Image: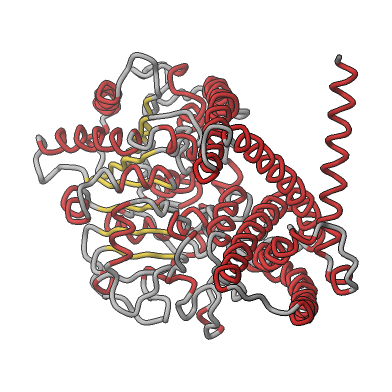
Amino acid sequence: MLRNLARRGAVGALKVAVVALEVYADLLPGVRMTKRRRLPEQLGAGILGAEAATWWAISPSLLPRPWWVTALNVAFCQGFGHAAATGVRFTVSRGFDLVGWRPRARVTQRTHEVLHAVMGTVTATVTVTSLLRQEQQAQLVSTPGREGRRDAVAGLLVGTLGYGALLLVGETAQQSINRMSRTLSRWLPPVVSWPLALVALVLVLGVTSDRFVIRRLLNSVGRSAQERNLSIFPGTVQPWEPERSGSPWSHEPWYALGSQGRALVSGGPRARDIRAVTGHEDVREPIRIYVGLRRGRDFRQQADQVLREMDRTGAFRRPTIVMMAAAGTGWLADWSVSSVEFLTGGNCVTVAMQYSYLPSAVAYVTDHDSPVVSSRILIDAVRQRLAEMDPATRPKLYVSGESLGAYGIVDSFRDYAQLLEQVDGAVFSGPPRFTRIHRALTETRDPGSPERLPVLDRGRHVRFAAVPAHLRHDFSGADLAEDWQSPRIVFAQHASDPITFWDWNLFFTQPAWLREPGSRGVPAPKAQQLDVFEGMRWAPFITGWQVGLDQISSLKFPGGHAHQYHGEMPYYWVGVLGEQVVVDFDDRLARHIEQWVRVHLIKR
């Protein structure tokens, strides 16, 4: 029996490979223009649609793509193009049937010949052009020679094989529906039996995939994340400073912090490091407070534990308190935390608590309320204690977060007005597109300012920045308001960050950031080209899928690009902290801070 199953599996795999190769051969311009058709003629419209979709699949996106991401993109786009073109062919054919007229065979043949010749030429041109653009796109994100032409060719070939496999899956589904429809037609009319068979197959596939694929995958991810949360990253050691959670004097045990919390309190600059890097003599030991996610302890109990730690360390006697929200795994941005500590001479407090140990994408899908609820509870707890203090000696409260952490903090406020009312400043980096207040601010931007770099009230309170220069100037180079009033808010978002620019609407509508002067796809004066790429175009469904896939590799690029916010963070914090900055800050110090963090960063 096992031998028969193995034989059937081998034969099935061979059929998939053969059909996929036939599909690829049928997509080659040379084969198609010589009329050596390999697949059945009824697939002709689908093949043309797949070929047209390939033009966008291999076109530039926000980021250079590794070969396997290109393969996923090509397979999906070709499958979508096939389905769309087949639907158009079916509709046109039924239209001819209704009017009782069809073009003569000779006209149809000539039309097909011209269409195949034109599309074959376009495909060859687009393919060559896309390969030539690979290096240009890699240079824009400071990765020359990476994800180059070899990756593009490999991705195109493997993706086309995947498209062939999708055709086999579609054919199998079609035959299953037809068989089920014929069985049902014994008792039901065809107008009912076929749709009923389709619905039945979809339900069966949905239930089966949910039970045996999705749930098992989520369970596997959950177990893996839980094991990782219990681990200790290389280079992580228990802190000995009383100012840190997890130390022998802490109310929060070392084992309870989780892997990301242990890395946070273990790493970062100490007073001696701050003195050596900044040259500032009046330095204090920074306070880092982190409370992990433990079974049987809810968010309010976590917040109470944070307050206990703040009381123990004397946090409320420090002039600067920064409340940070973690990403899904409990990770906090080291570049942001360390920047504040260097700039304030260590006279600051960083507080955070963990709400999940799952990766951000999984954490949001399974429970998108926890980042917001946990942030709101901690903010309220800290603000209540601050309200009891003398205003003359009360510390300033700042909030910050990156990625899902930015979403958790920002959307924990009712609206933009409440954000300004309740904090003294904020820095948010790489906020996801679904962040409600971020989206609202973008939609109400000043007329003429671009979507990818909005300006609100000439930057009176909030400023969007792709590079530090945007704290003073907008994208066109015009000066922002000289008086940057407190509280100051910064939204850091790179033009190449797919997490900031992807949302579901991208599947159906062209975003403004792909039409604006100086943005992607539209030429701009050379002096204004800050991290832009002039080759990206929008296509229904395809662009949404492309930018969605870009998120997979968005953490694989150097700082200053994609979803990597590194050396620019000291500049953003200098702008927000204002008089809280006690060191002499300049570009030289910014480079020294960046170098120190890069060398001492705990990889996790």
> Is 282 above or below relative to 227?
below
Instruction: Name the one closer to the observer, 542 or 24.
Output: 24
Q: In this view, does 305 lie to the left or right of 341?
A: left
Q: Is residue 471 left or right of residue 224?
A: left
How far across and down, in percent of the image, does residue 322 sit?
31, 43
Task: Tell me the residue at 21%/65% (across/down).
Answer: 485
Instruction: Name the one closer to the observer, 531 or 1.
Output: 1
Q: How many marks?
A: 0
Instruction: Name the one closer to the observer, 2 or 43.
Output: 43
Quadrant containing the N terminus in the rendered view: top right
Quadrant containing the C terminus in the rendered view: top right
How far across and down, in percent of the image, does residue 443 sit?
31, 66
Q: How is the model colour-coded? A: secondary structure
Q: In which quarter of the image is residue 412?
A: top left
Q: In which quarter of the image is residue 194?
A: top right
How far across and down, in percent of the image, does residue 353 sit?
36, 30
Q: Is residue 232 shown to the viewer in this render?
A: no
Task: Tell me the residue at 60%/60% (across/down).
Answer: 87
